Amino acid sequence: MKKLTGLVGGALVAASFVMPAKADTLRFAVGFPSGAPIEAAQKYAEAVKELTNNKHRVRIFELSLLSHAEMNEGINKGLADVGYLLTAYSPSDYPFSNMGADMSMSVALNDKIPEKEGMAYSGAMLEYIMLNCPECQGEFKKNNQVYTGVVSTPVYTMFCNAPVDTVEELKGKRIRISGAPWARWAREFGAQPVALPIGEAYEALSQGVVDCTFFSATELTNFNLIEVVKNIVTDVPGGLYAAGGAATLNKTKWDKFSTAEKEALLKAGSVMTSEVTYRYQKQAMDDLEKARKKGINVMQADPELLKKSHEFISKDLAYIPEFYAQEYKLDPARLKDLSGTMSKLVDKWSDIVAKADIQSAEDLQKLYWDEVYSKIDVDKYGN
């Protein structure tokens, strides 16, 4: 049984690979024009080139090959060899994986990891999907895909036109939401959730179509919302986006690789995961500072709102497996078991990240490698 060995820096056994006579270029589709996903994809491409001793290369397609909505089928059919897949766009194809992602508001209940929530949740999602959820692996296999890295944003904050930081001020507000848990949160406080594509948020806020929107701070510059947002509440609603695979491979392509090549691509996946997670978090902190300098009111929620928010989150986390069982006709006992596993992993990774000295994406990659990737049976993975 072949287990993964070594870190990226020390794993250049690639020189001794038995490679195909004709090396190819992997097409990597990323549905973003710029920002952390593209920057991380460039690091992924460098890692693939290095780890395969220049036998395999990666060409990044920014928006031009597949959109987010097309990514699932595009990877499945081989239009892209690798894709930045957001599984929330295909909810019925990935219910087990998405359930783990939908538990992200749990990080709001943990005060050990301020400004590192995404780092902890990336680790928890990797361990959940790669080592603890065979049903998740089956979802990717059914879609002719292999999961090698996670998508994870920083925590969601609340961008508003007027100040909205109390229970009373939330009532009646129209809020652009990012998924079912946030819609339930909004309704809990008497607000009206509004589903809008992210690209329409700028106009919706500027014209008052919505009063607030839930986003990570990175969208202040990614979508230029810093021009229209007047108030930001940093500690509600909480949660983050982790529904996807940052470097999801076409399984037909994967199956043609040797064991050493698969190992290299898993190592590159750990690079992609750490780079996108670390870069997103750094950008979030930088963007909040830009907002303050621009005169945007950056504040925390009223203590009563924060208390009631935490009470709702605790209640909602218990409801999530029930929701998935009803929505997708799945075994409620199994979902409850998996949700318990995910909860323990979030606690575990919150402790790991709180104790770790993370000063770079490389530091984060080592954590993910040691705790998750190094434990994968590479000969069986993806089969």
Image (cartoon, rainbow, N blue to C red):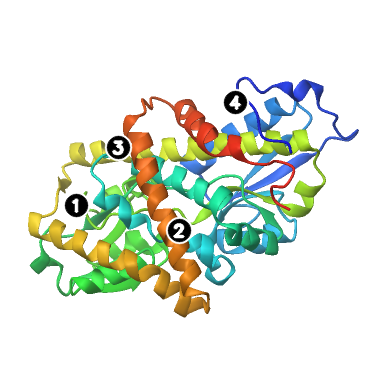
- Marks 2 and 3, how far apart in space? 25 Å
Q: Could you say which disc has been placed on residue 233 in the image?
A: 1
Quadrant in which the N terminus is drawn: top right
Residue assigned mark 3: 285
Residue assigned mark 2: 100
Nearer the observer: mark 3 or 4; the answer is: 4
Q: Where is residue 244 in the image (x, y as percent from the top left)?
A: 52, 54
Q: Can residue 35 be seen in this view?
A: no
Nearer the observer: mark 2 or 3; the answer is: 2
Q: Which of the two labelled residues, at mark 3 and mark 4, occupies the earlier sequence position?
A: 4
Q: Which of the two labelled residues, at mark 2 and mark 3, occupies the earlier sequence position?
A: 2
- Marks 1 and 4, how far apart in space? 39 Å
Viewer-closest of 124 and 74: 124
Q: Which residue is drawn at 52% across and 49% down?
A: 32
Q: Which of the two labelled residues, at mark 2 and mark 4, occupies the earlier sequence position?
A: 4
Residue assigned mark 4: 7
Q: Where is residue 207 in the image (x, y as percent from the top left)?
A: 26, 66
Say which element carries label 1. strand
Whether tag 2 and tag 3 are in contact, CB under 8 A, the answer is: no
